[in-house]
């Protein structure tokens, strides 16, 4: 249960002014690190105690796979795609983007599909 709470998403404002979603634990650790940087001794002690207790916390998160879309198309015999291919690819991309929007609304990540 604690893991579920710690990794629940929360909206934060990024440096560029836009909002983004990060985990609650990431937000807490960021605030703690920022307080330690501002010379808050209690925050610094807490931050380094956590690092000592959990040394792997400094490891970067694993890379997420990037979806790659490959379209195999028939040739017209002269090295050009058959007529209508561009429209088909555009339609397939729009369908895929709509599916991604729907999954985002449902809270599902690409890796869960």
Image (cartoon, grey):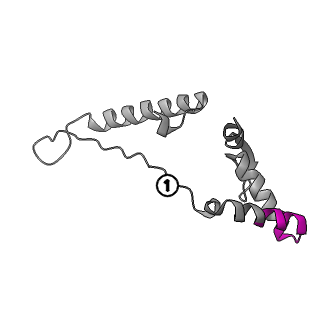
Asked if residue 44 lies in the magenta stretch, the reply is yes
User: Please, is residue 50 above or below residue 18 in the view?
Assistant: below
User: Please, is residue 46 above or below residue 65 in the view?
Assistant: below
The quadrant the N terminus occupies is: top right
Q: Residue furthest left?
A: 77
Chain part drawn in magenta: 35-48
Asked if residue 29 lies in the magenta stretch, the reply is no
Q: Position of residue 87 (x, y in %)?
A: 33, 34
- Residue at image coords 10%, 43%: 77
Q: Is residue 67 left or right of residue 32?
A: left
- Residue at image coords 72%, 55%: 14
Query: Helix, strand, or loop for circle 1?
Result: loop
Can residue 109 be seen by looking at this rendering? yes
- Residue at image coords 85%, 63%: 43
User: Please, is residue 58 above or below residue 101 in the view?
Assistant: below
Q: Which of 3 and 84 is in front in this view?
A: 3
Q: Nearer the viewer, residue 91 or 19?
A: 19
- Residue at image coords 40%, 36%: 93
Q: Where is residue 34 in the image (x, y as percent from the top left)?
A: 80, 64
The quadrant the C terminus occupies is: top left
Q: In this view, does 77 lie to the left or right of 95?
A: left
Q: Position of residue 109 (x, y in %)?
A: 53, 37
| Secondary structure, magenta segment, majority class | helix
Can residue 18 be seen by looking at this rendering? no
Mark 1 lies on residue: 63
């Amino acid at each position: 249960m604690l893991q579920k709470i710690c990794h629940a998403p929360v909206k934060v404002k990024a440096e560029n002014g836009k909002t983004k979603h990060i985990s609650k634990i990431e937000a807490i650790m960021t605030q703690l690190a920022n307080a330690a940087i501002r010379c808050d001794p209690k925050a610094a002690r807490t931050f380094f105690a956590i690092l000592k207790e959990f040394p792997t916390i400094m490891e970067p998160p694993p890379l997420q796979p990037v979806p790659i879309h490959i379209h195999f198309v028939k040739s017209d015999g002269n090295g050009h795609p058959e007529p209508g291919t561009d429209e088909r690819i555009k339609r397939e991309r729009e369908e895929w983007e709509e599916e991604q929007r729907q999954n985002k609304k449902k809270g599902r990540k690409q890796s869960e599909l």
